[in-house]
Image (spheres, helix red, strand yellow):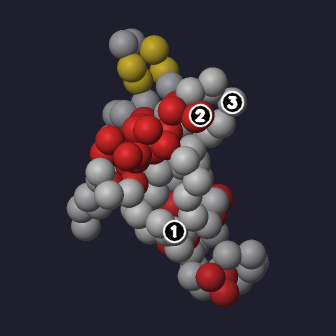
């Protein structure tokens, strides 16, 4: 089923038929609600574009944003799961699961999962 990149699907059935070509699992998908997003972490997008690669201390850096997220999670007691201490990466993954803007980028092998994330409403 040949499609252009920006051509919308008319029905879920059309999408599922298109997605079958990727069932062998060698593709990864990213479901985002805004087609202008590049492959960047949400924390990176929150830093003003002219400050993203700057050492200027006027805005928090990408690293500072994530360090603060982990520190705040630990202070609030979200650093344990089932009696086991969580690593910084595990904390960031949990925070990302609850829509925090972290340094992580989500990918999936499932076109259907990517579709769900692309269509999910972002609550402000």
**Answer yes or no: do the residues labelled 3 and 1 have beta carbons within 8 Å?**
no
For disc 2, the marked residue is 22
**Answer yes or no: do the residues labelled 2 and 3 have beta carbons within 8 Å?**
yes
Q: In the visual, does 19 lie left or right of 82?
A: right
Q: Of residues 43 and 14, which is closer to you in this image?
A: 14
For disc 3, the marked residue is 26
Picture quadrant where residue 32 is located: bottom left
Marks 1 and 2, how far apart at CA: 18 Å
Q: In the visual, does 70 lie left or right of 58?
A: left
Marks 3 and 1, how far apart at CA: 22 Å
For disc 1, the marked residue is 6
Task: Give coordinates of residue 100: x percent, y percent.
Answer: 40, 53
**Answer yes or no: do the residues labelled 1 and 2 have beta carbons within 8 Å?**
no
Give the number of the mark in front: 3 or 1.
Answer: 1
Quick one: label 3, few (<14), some, or many (20+) residues within 10 Å?
few
Q: Of residues 122 and 17, which is closer to you in this image?
A: 17
Marks 2 and 3, how far apart at CA: 7 Å
């Amino acid at each position: 089923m040949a499609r252009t990149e920006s051509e919308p699907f008319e029905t879920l059935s059309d999408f599922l038929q298109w997605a079958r070509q990727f069932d062998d699992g060698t593709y990864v998908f990213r479901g985002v609600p805004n087609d202008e997003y590049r492959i960047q972490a949400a924390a990176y997008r929150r830093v003003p574009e002219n400050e993203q690669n700057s050492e200027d201390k006027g805005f928090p850096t990408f690293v500072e944003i994530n360090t603060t997220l982990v520190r705040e999670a630990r202070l609030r007691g979200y650093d344990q799961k089932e009696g086991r201490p969580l690593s910084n990466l595990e904390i960031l993954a949990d925070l990302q699961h609850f829509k925090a803007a972290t340094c992580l980028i989500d990918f999936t092998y499932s076109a259907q999962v990517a579709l769900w994330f692309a269509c999910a409403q972002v609550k402000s």
